[in-house]
Amino acid sequence: MRVAIITANTEIYRGNEEDKSGKVIQQIMEEAGHQIVFMKALPCDKTVLSTVMQRMADGKLTDLILTTGGAGCKVGECMPEATLEIVDRPVVGIPEAMRAYMMQISKRAMLNRCAAGIRGEVLIVNLPGKANAVKQCLEYLLPEITHAAGLIKE
């Protein structure tokens, strides 16, 4: 499966911080045998994020877009809004399952606003912004999101 990784973090985009969460996604997906076709940090700007995801999906450049960051409660975090703006069909069970699973570890998981949905033949899933939370969520969700991405192609 072809996977795109987008980190929504203006400080990482500017080169002021390391993209730890993006690297965690890359490692997990490559270990699972998936091909990373795009990996980039972008500013936390709704127009930039939605435009990049839309172009990737419409251009059929990837099968799955995994995002990290930009889904918390801080001012300016907008990844869920950017995602929901472009998806044709929301897949609400993915973020619901992620939050329910993570609530067993930390009550702060309730503050995560991640979204998921389908645009054309591409599944888009927002993951948390912290590397450890990304690892826990992606390892938990990977079988189901891999299955879903396959179903979308049928």
Image (spheres, helix red, strand yellow):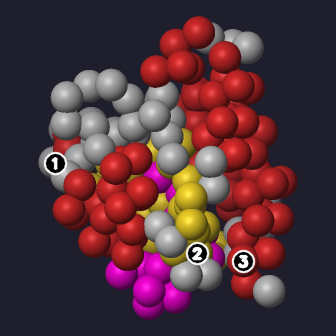
Query: Pointer 3: what residue?
Result: 152
Image side of residue 135 versus residue 130, left or right: right
Q: Which residues are magenta?
A: 55-67
Give the CA separation, mark 3 to mark 2.
7 Å
Q: Secondary structure at mark 2?
A: strand
Query: Pointer 1: what residue?
Result: 14
Which amino acid is tagged 1? Arg
Is residue 1 visible to us here? yes
Where is residue 140? Give x, y as percent.
77, 39
Q: Secondary structure at mark 3?
A: helix
Query: Pointer 2: what residue?
Result: 122
Which amino acid is tagged 3? Ile
Position above or below: 114 against 116: above
Which amino acid is tagged 2? Val
Indicate whether residue 37 is drawn in magenta. Answer: no
Dot 2 and dot 1 residues touching (CB under 8 Å): no
Q: Which mark is residue 141?
A: none
Where is residue 86? Give x, y as percent.
39, 68
Q: Which residue lies at the image location 23% right of the left edge and 55% below the top edge?
A: 46
Dot 3 and dot 2 residues touching (CB under 8 Å): yes
